[in-house]
Amino acid sequence: METIQEQLLSAQQTGRLVSLFRYGDERHFLTGNVIAVDEKFGLIKRINQNGAVDGLIVLRLNTITKVIAQSDYLKSLVAIMALARERHYSDVWQIDAITTDLDLAHHSVLKATLKWAFKQDQVVSLGIHPGKREKTYTGFIAALKNKSCNLTMLMLPI
């Protein structure tokens, strides 16, 4: 049986859309194209249910419990993505342009993505998962050191 990393690398090489399940949760998943994979992390271009690009997400490989590369949902979503491209709303955030700016040749997936966000002054959301729950922090990267990241948090009204 292929490891999660091997499945993601295969999807990256073929350009295949995949659904990813995390933390053993069989009811919730995210869908996207694999942009890059290293020993610990995968960079995924998320695709929403309307066929549009919904941003980039870096996932720790050990949180992914299942990869699905073929399903009726994925077949339908490919058709919906074609419609989104035809109607010019498939990549309003210009994510494809962003991925070419990432220095994945010299840095890990996580570090390359954080360095890009810091340099471009982009908002990031960082998820910390002590077990099966994930706490998310959103803001701008104030400082990026070798093994630490300082975040200026955004305070959003509820």
Image (spheres, grey):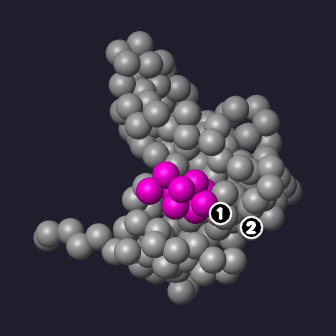
Residues at discs 2 and 1 in contact (Cβ within 8 Å): yes
Please name the residue shown 14% across and 70% down the image.
158
Give the amino acid at mark 1.
Leu
Please provide percent x and percent y for residue 126: 48, 70
Is residue 15 toward the left or the right of residue 154 in the image?
A: right
Which of labels 2 and 1 is toward the front?
1
Q: Quadrant of residue 151?
A: bottom left
Q: Is residue 113 visible?
A: yes
Q: Which label number is shown at residue 110?
A: 1
Considering every residue shown, the one lying at the far left of the view is: 158
* Label whose residue precedes the other's in the sequence (2 or 1): 2
Residue in the image at 54% along x and 56% along y: 119
17 in relation to 102, above or below: above
Q: In what element is the residue under mark 2?
A: loop
Please, what is the three-letter code of the amino acid marked with disc 2? Answer: Lys
Which residue has dot 2 on it? 40
Q: Which span of residues is magenta-colored?
A: 113-121
In which quadrant is the N terminus drawn? bottom right
Res 49 → quadrant: top left
What residue appears at the point 63 percent right and 52 percent down from the top-left corner? Answer: 43
Q: Is 31 within the magenta?
A: no
Among all residues in the image, which is located at the extreme bottom? 130
How much space separates mark 2 and mark 1, taking CA atoms? 9 Å
Q: Position of residue 133 (x, y in %)?
A: 46, 80
Magenta stretch secondary structure, dominant: helix
- Is residue 118 shown in magenta? yes
